[in-house]
Amino acid sequence: MADANSIDTSDIQVRRIPEAASVGGETVYSFEDAAAYRSFCERAFAKGYNFPNCLTGLDMGYGLRSVLNLRNLDDFSEITIWMDVPYDAPHVPSVTDIWGGVEWHEREAYDLLGIIYTGHPDLRRILLEDHWTIHPLQRRYDTGGYLIPSWEAQAWPNWEEMARLKEEEAKKAAEAAKKRAEEAKAKAAAAKAAKDAEDAAKEGDA
Amino acid sequence: MSDSTVLDTVLTNPAVGSSPTGLVQSRSDEMIVNLGPQHPATHGVLQIVLGIDGERVTSATPHIGFLHRNHEKIEEARTYEQVIPYLDRMDYVSGLQNELPYILAIEELSGIEVPERAKYIRTALFELNRVISHLVWLGTYLLDLGAITPFLYAFRDRELALDIIEKTAGARLLPNYYTFGGVRRDIHPLFWQNLGEFCDYFETVIPEYAALTIDAPIFQARTIDVGFLNAATAINHGITGPNLRAAGVAHDLRKDQPYDAYPELDFDVITLERGDAYARSKVRFEEFYQSLSLIRQCIEKAPRSGAFKGKGRVKIEEYQQRYKAVEASRGQLGVFVASDGGTGPYRSKHRSPSFTNLQVIPDLFIGQKFADVIAILGSIDIVLGEVDR
Amino acid sequence: MALLGNERRPENIVLGTLDDLINLARSRSMWPLTFGIACCAIEMMNSSATRYDADRFGFFYRNTPRQADVMIVSGTVNKKLGKRLRVLYDQMAEPRWVISMGACANQGGPFRQGYSVVEGVDKIVPVDVYVPGCPPRPEALLQALLLLRDKVADPDMRYIPGTQMEADFDVLAEPGKDGREHL
């Protein structure tokens, strides 16, 4: 029975992230040292985490992070392993020799994010053309002003809110109409009074 | 290497030897054959450069990326709701299935409850999509192997299933129907009845398909003992879906990490031992029956009234991440979502089964006959939209 | 025979050009190229399969560009595929026509803003018929094929060989780079 807690981490530097950071309940191990990451991966494989779910990367703003998600096919528990690297030296040890299934995932992370997997047997671009120089999923890469960032994008209509606003508007319009009608009435009354006074004056003259 | 050195190597090579007549039997020259990107049997725009020695394949180098559509970059600039239509377009053969892992992940992150009825609607449509996807596999695989009629039969029955989806979701191929907390609009009044009729009809035609394919001697001759994939390689390479189950590994996320209505349903994981192209085809055939049984159970157990969409709004406060996977028709379809508290995903990576399954093909091709390359490639069942994303 | 009837004489004699007669025959057996790219390719397959059956109009899919008259661009064309697409187009024998199927091929569609998507296949090959939709239904593709048939048979829109547009290879370049250096 493989238990994530039973992986011996006494002699390597590792930071365990509390489960709040990952709602699914899988344990997260975070590394900054290449040797420790590599050593931990070997231990996880020995403990039965033999199925590579997913390997990807993301741009954290202060550096790049390689995220490896593993599954144990005996009890279907999952662990996640993070490796943080700086922008100027984005070197992460490759784990292709442990799990063959991450080979193309590592190539993709290199292609789109620029993480260099040291020891990878065939680290070439996979989705983009070989002569390209950009790593488009890095946040500093600008698409030429085409893409609207999500914080400026307009959310899709909130129907309840829109219905409420519509009701409010209708109410306001009704009030305004009422007000206008009253004003018109007052105006008419004033005009009538003025006319009456005029008529009275004329009669007086006569 | 100079010419004389080459000749020496050939003469001294014990594998080549010399014939009784004294003439040197040299090997034939290695030939490079380019397959794709425009090839009717690559199921899209896949390029494979094959090295061929006589009839045997000596090397295979796949080149992908001809359909790279920047899903992940575009999704970073969309709100959570706006991402869903893009997901349909990844695996366009079974469009609805792609939406589910992302929606499940976001529902878990923001704590949205799904009503019971919506779960059953989702599950029934998920299984119907599996039937649709396997029908496309059946038609195109047999087309690759040289049989044209099964393609016409498969697409005839696929239309009937697409009609059910169109009637209730509004679009036939890429419906954009699942949403956070359930489905986008209520089902058609005759939805369950139509599904039942489809199941009754489709069950009667599966034996016809079997007679044309897995029971036919020509199909068996083309696929048996071709493209072996053993369990250890399959697990190590992250192979999933019918390809993994045909290698004898009983791994099915519907059973092992159940989602939606699957915990309530009764089914067994289908496994076969051989791991060749025939076994992979047979597993897909068994899954026809399994999907029909699951749809029938959904029809029986689904509540006939109730909400089709739960209350709740997508609200992810701080930095959080989630990897969530479902068992799609091609294997484990996962999504890795990271949020920074904004209105949209900070990063979303789609772990598509075809992408991971495709990387094992050099291992499957090498040593096989050149004519079997198409038979092996079709039995893996890839969709290029999902490979390149 | 309105198409041929430039001049009509009694005793069932019709005068016209040979080109028009050939084009009329050509329009009744258009052979599209089997070149499925993305989602629209599934609907393209549907249009030739059981319910929609494009065969009845003489549209029969050929697997090699040398035998095809029409290229149906059925999906998103990205910068890596663009060069191959033009090569395929150049391999087709003249006269040749192109149908741009779906929003992606028309102008980039939902992926228009991406870094590797060509915003409209008409920058690479000349397009005769545009089909809107994401994806278009098989009926829409059939209508496009019938429109193209009318165009081929129309004496006013006769195909003039050797007048095809050059591809704008700058659209295939890496963002911020000149397109011609790696061709």
Image (cartoon, coloured by chain):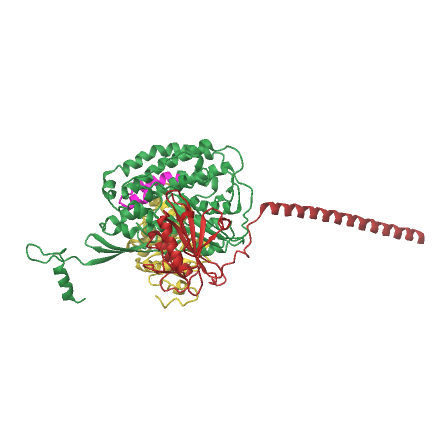
* Image location of residue A46, percent across then percent down: 35, 49
User: Can residue A56 be seen at all in this image of the molecule?
Assistant: yes
Which of B254 and C99 lies nearest the eye of the viewer? Answer: B254
Specify the quadrant of the image occupied by residue C23: bottom left
Placement of A190 over or under B242, stated as above or below: below
Which color is chain B depicted in?
green
Q: Residue drawn at (87%, 50%), measured in percent from left and top?
A: A196
* Image location of residue C162, percent across then percent down: 33, 63
* Image location of residue C172, percent across then percent down: 39, 62
In the image, residue A124 lies in the stretch drawn in magenta = no
Q: How many marks?
A: 0
Which of B9 and B227 lies nearest the eye of the viewer? Answer: B9
Principal SS element in the magenta part? helix
What stretch of residues is rendered in magenta? B138-159
User: Can residue C33 be seen at all in this image of the molecule?
Assistant: no
* Image location of residue A167, percent across then percent down: 65, 45
Which color is chain C depicted in?
yellow
Placement of B158 over or under B18, stated as above or below: above
Residue pushed farthest front? A10
Which of B23 and C37 lies nearest the eye of the viewer? Answer: B23
Identify the chain drawn in red.
A
For the N terminus of chain B, the quadrant is bottom left
